[in-house]
Structure formats: structure tokens, C-alpha cells
Amino acid sequence: MAPSKSRAPGGSATAKGGKKPPAATNVDEYLARVPDEVRLALEALRRTILTAVPGSTERIEYGMPVVHHRGPLVGFAAQKRPCAFYVMSPALVDAHAAELKPFDVGRACIRFVPEHPLPSRLVTELVQARVSENAARAAG
């Protein structure tokens, strides 16, 4: 019988007692490793983010996809069941508390399940607010 495997956040499978495979090196590879339902939700979130910030770049940081525009902007990740959208700004999460009530919210993280995704309008608003924060930080 083959050793059992489990999926770690980000979709990397590990064999019991074995070594983890190499971490994803790009966002497409990261998304390919997560379950289909979660992947579809994260791909939709990714499209919304990239549409809101033309010219942004993506990379894997902290074991998850992070979008950059004048520095780290937002990130997203697959967790055991929910998906996570990392706004990276507690002030923005606080400012949108009323709109975020239906979701499981952390200090700068919003967790959601694929069947109840974040509204695109809200994601766009949060991402654009982060662009403004990064621009203000860059300006001094």
C-alpha cells in the first residue's frame, strides 16, 4: 500500500514521514496544486485583483501568491476548507467591517468558502485602497 498523502495549505502534498515536495515557484503552479473547487474560487479572486491593478506583478512569498505594486499589495491562499484573502492592512479591514460581517475576518485576512466568494466590487475597492497605501508609503 502506498503511503498516505495529505494536502498542506497551498496544495503541496506530503507523504507520511516523507519530505515535502518543492514549494510552488509561481502562481499557476500554486493553483494547480489545490483542489478544483478552491482553485476556481482563487482564480476568480486573482482575475479581480489583476484587473484592479494593471501592471502589477505576482510572486510566491510566505508560501502563497502575493501581488505586488510598489511593494506587497495583497495575497491569497488555499487553507484546509476556506480560501483566504490577505489585505495586509488591518486599517482597511477595520474600515470595511460592516461589509465584511458575513465573512470570517482576522487582523488583515478575510476567509471565505468557494460557494460564498468575496464580492468583486469589494475586492476591487480593497485592492485599490492598498495601491493608495503603497503609493503614500513610497512618497514618504
Image (spheres, rainbow, N blue to C red):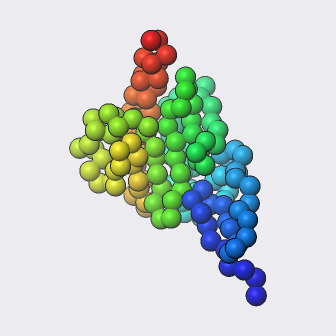
Front residue of 67 and 124: 67
Q: Which residue is drawn at 41% across and 53% down?
A: 111
Q: Check the image and report above or below for 14 versus 96.
A: below
Q: Residue at x 34, y 50 (%)?
A: 105
**Location of residue 16 by image quarter:** bottom right
x, y percent for residue 75 = 52, 42
Position of residue 11 in the picture relative to residue 49 (left or right): right
Residue at the extreme bottom of the image, as rendered:
1
Position of residue 102 in the picture relative to residue 15 (left or right): left
Q: Check the image and report above or below for 51 versus 62.
A: above
Q: Check the image and report above or below for 53 versus 139.
A: below
Q: Residue at x 65, y 45 (%)?
A: 27
x, y percent for residue 50 = 56, 35
| Quadrant location of the C terminus in the rendered image | top left
x, y percent for residue 106 = 35, 49
**Location of residue 1 by image quarter:** bottom right
